[in-house]
Image (cartoon, helix red, strand yellow):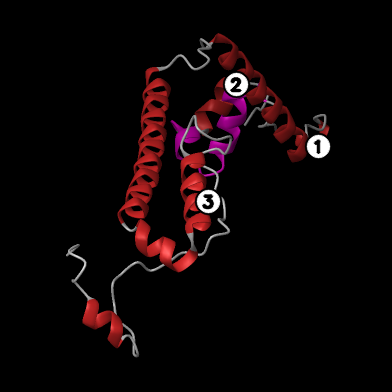
């Protein structure tokens, strides 16, 4: 066989050898992708590429730049969206309802104090009764300087105003209902 004569060499090579032989797939990939840096027949001669850490940093920087550009393109509506306004309205409504409930509670406490004024005065005296009424009225918005939502401890002790008799109150039981109030 004459290796200088291409025709004689090709006569000895089987037809479509490059498709059937197992090792030829590697040669084909190199020929097809000859300009690709990742596939080379002599990889040791190629210059070193980026390390994984450098590649990740570059990707992170590119992604941050893309996100920054996308953020700059978005319209900025400070407190302009409808959902935020709806939530704000709901919160304001809830606050006003809480304030209304606090005022109603204070008014009902004052009414209970007025209804049971005689009992309270008998137990603690006129001065404590007036002090307690004044404290309750000062908690009402617009009347005192105390904020309605702040909790304040009151110096007057809480009293159970239920009408129950204790042992040794026989005199009270005999006179119960004789003053015409029940």
Q: Disc 1 designates what residue?
A: 44
Tell which tag, 3 or 2, sits nearer the viewer: 3
Q: CA distance from mark 2 to mark 1?
A: 38 Å
How busy is the neighbourhood of tag 3: few (under 14 within 10 Å), some, or many (20 plus)?
A: some
Q: Element under label 1?
A: helix
Q: Earlier in the sequence, mark 2 or mark 1?
A: 1
How busy is the neighbourhood of tag 1: few (under 14 within 10 Å), some, or many (20 plus)?
A: few
Is 93 left or right of 66, judged from the image as shown?
left
Discs 3, 1 touching: Cβ within 8 Å: no
Residue 39 locus on image (x, y percent): 66, 32
> Who is closer to the viewer here, 11 or 129?
129
Residue at 63% across, 21% down: 5
Discs 3, 2 touching: Cβ within 8 Å: no
Q: Disc 3 designates what residue?
A: 131
Quarter of the image where the C terminus is located:
bottom left
Q: Disc 2 designates what residue?
A: 67
Quarter of the image where the N terminus is located:
top right
Q: Element under label 2?
A: helix
Q: CA distance from mark 3 to mark 1?
A: 96 Å
Placement of 126 over or under 60, stated as above or below: below
Q: Earlier in the sequence, mark 3 or mark 2?
A: 2
Residue at 18% across, 71% down: 177
Q: Which residues are magenta?
A: 15-36
Tell which tag, 2 or 1, sits nearer the viewer: 2
């Amino acid at each position: 066989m004459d290796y200088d004569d291409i025709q004689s060499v090709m006569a000895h090579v089987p037809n479509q050898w490059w498709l059937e032989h197992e090792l030829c797939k590697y040669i084909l990939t190199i020929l097809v992708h000859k300009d690709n840096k990742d596939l080379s027949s002599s990889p040791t001669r190629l210059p070193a590429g980026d390390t994984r850490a450098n590649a990740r940093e570059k990707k992170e920087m590119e992604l941050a730049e893309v996100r920054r550009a996308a953020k700059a393109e978005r319209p900025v509506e400070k407190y302009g969206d409808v959902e935020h306004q709806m939530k704000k309205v709901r919160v304001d409504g809830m606050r006003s309802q809480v304030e209304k409930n606090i005022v109603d509670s204070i008014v009902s406490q004052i009414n209970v104090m007025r209804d049971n004024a005689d009992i309270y005065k008998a137990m603690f005296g006129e001065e404590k009764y007036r002090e307690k009424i004044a404290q309750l009225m000062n908690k009402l918005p617009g009347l005192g300087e105390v904020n309605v939502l702040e909790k304040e401890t009151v110096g007057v002790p809480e009293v159970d105003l239920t009408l129950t008799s204790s042992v040794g109150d026989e005199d009270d039981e005999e006179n119960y209902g004789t003053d015409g109030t029940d």
